[in-house]
Amino acid sequence: MREVPAVGCRDANRKTDTMEHLWLTPVPGHAAHHPEDFGFRTDLGVLDAPASRTLRIDDATDVELRVAPGRHQCVISHDGEQWIETVGVFDEGASALPVLRSLAHPTPFASHVETGCTVTEHSPRGLRKELRRLWETLENTPLALAVQDPDEPAAVTAAACHVDTDSGVLMWRTWRVLPETGFVVRTRAELRLAATARAAA
């Protein structure tokens, strides 16, 4: 696997609160939301995002994370075909975030995809602990990305992806830290490449 250089990640000479995170992009301004404001879609194309990062899995397959305040996309591409998961705030056309959603053969190159969401509520102190845990997770994940409002450091949207090349499984997780309400919205997803896609690679 090979990581493609990130787009929109912050300059290495700029500092965060305590240390440098190359996967972190400052994006001023964020909208206050409740967990129920977010929706789930798989019918959209690639949307603009201030931060993105791609991991090349093999000659035919790559996965791209695209993150904006409150929104993420996971774009999995194989031989010209794409599977795009989008979670964000939409005016219409979105399903509620699934507690657990499983779908067989969502695209010609995948045999199965599963998505789930959990919401937890925290005190301000608890949110700070959650952010420390999130930072540790992002530091130790091959493909990670986050955007943060520099005027409200607790307002963070992040995504991380891990690939098991032996089994052909792509796993990604996302976080939305909502400081105004004290909630953390987490999603998790797993896509299994079809045997034909793994053989072709």
Image: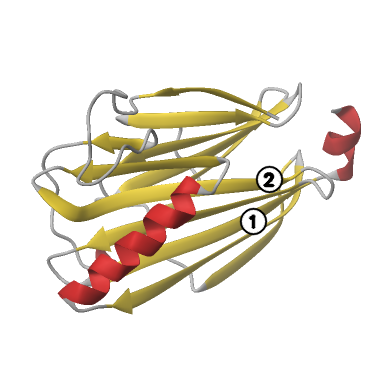
Dot 1: within a 10 Å radius of its alpha carbon, few (fewer than 14), some, or many (20 or more) residues?
some
Q: Earlier in the sequence, mark 2 or mark 1?
A: 2
Q: Nearer the viewer, residue 133 or 72?
A: 133
Q: Nearer the viewer, residue 56 or 135?
A: 135
**Please, which colouring scheme is shown?**
secondary structure
What quarter of the picture does the C terminus occupy?
Answer: top right
Residue that appears at 71% across and 32% down: 57
Would you name the residue on which mark 2 appears?
A: 163
The numbered disc on residue 124 is none
Would you name the residue on which mark 1 appears?
A: 190
Residue that appears at 24% across and 66% down: 128
Q: Amino acid at mark 2?
A: Val
- Residue farthest toward the front in the current orientation of the protein: 18
Q: CA distance from mark 2 to mark 1?
A: 10 Å
Q: Amino acid at mark 1?
A: Glu
Q: Is residue 173 above or below residue 5?
A: below
Q: Secondary structure at mark 2?
A: strand
Q: Secondary structure at mark 1?
A: strand
Residue that appears at 29% across and 42% down: 19
Q: Quick check: can you spot residue 46?
A: no
Position of residue 24 measured from the top left corner of the image (x, y, whole percent): 33, 38
Position of residue 187 measured from the top left corner of the image (x, y, whole percent): 46, 62
Q: Nearer the viewer, residue 25 or 170?
A: 25
Q: Quadrant of residue 15?
A: top left
Dot 2: within a 10 Å radius of its alpha carbon, few (fewer than 14), some, or many (20 or more) residues?
many
